[in-house]
Image (cartoon, rainbow, N blue to C red):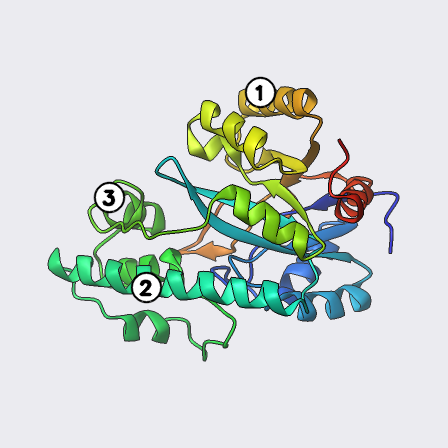
Amino acid sequence: MTVATGTCDLHTHTLASDGMQSPAENVRLARDKGLAAIAITDHDTVAGVKEAMEEGVRSGVTVVPGVEISTRASGKDIHVLGYYVDCGNELFLQRLADLRNTRDERNAKMIAKLRELGVDITMEEVIAGLGRELGPDETVARPHIADVLVGKGYARDMRDAFDKYLGENAPAYVSVPRISPDEACSWIREAGGTPVLAHPGIYGDDGLVREILEQARPAGIEVFHSDHGPEDEKRYQAMADQYGLIVTAGSDFHGARQGVVFHGEIGNRTVSAKVLEQLRQASAGFGLR
């Protein structure tokens, strides 16, 4: 279905990865916010898409099937969003499963590092903290580990847990081999989708951002994001214009942890739902340029 009017939030997470709400709840929140469309973009999994799309039919909200793929470039974690991917593509699903296995290895190494630092934590505690059985295509991520650190008094809140232990350059952070942004863009295209570079302002390196745009050639860039300020938006809008990229927006909604919404509320960053047609066309034609 093509949406001609209204606004959309093209970056949200659910219980399928490190979000706090079910896919259906995200869709209902989007409806309550008056959005025309919402994308489900969980980390390295499309496990939440089916439920979201079913709720979208009931709620009158267009749901964009998506994913956020974890990659590595120049020593930094880089995320690539994929829209309108074929969630039944067996090769793509296997590739995502391999990425989740890598994430599981990283989690185990981070838990070991935390224990070396004197932090009393186990992976069993982290999984138990989910409050439900972990689905076969769902992932455990750093925010889940942060929840346990906060609950046991090792950190004040999730941000403190990342600053003290889990963020890049923090003592328990572990870097594992990941695919490149170029590979992620290729995987997304091969699965019939459209790749978009996520939240470039988070990387703190616009030279690297340009390298990725030139080498991986995503079809779009997330200009509007909860962690982007006005100056960031101006810079990345200019890059979008320079490289002929689709401009997207997303809250990167994960829900509330310890009463704090991370990164932002659903609908706090949006673009016209006409962008969906651009993403569809890019998916069909491997880019608009």
* Disc on res. 156: none
Q: Residue at x 49, y 67 (%)?
A: 97
The amino acid on which the numbered mark 2 sits, given as a three-letter code, is: Glu
Of 81 and 30, nearer the camera is 81
**Residue 98 appears at what percent x and percent y?**
46, 65
* Disc 3 + disc 1, Cβ < 8 Å: no
Q: Residue 76 in the image: x percent, y percent? A: 38, 39
Residue tagged 3: 170
Q: Are marks 1 and 2 in contact (CB under 8 Å)?
A: no
Q: In this view, does 60 lie to the left or right of 237?
A: right
For mark 2, what is the residue? 105
Which residue shows up at 27% across the image and 65% down it? 108
Comparing 19 with 183, the one in front is 183
Residue 235's disc number: 1
* Marks 3/1: CA–CA distance: 29 Å
Report if residue 271 is visible in the image.
Answer: yes
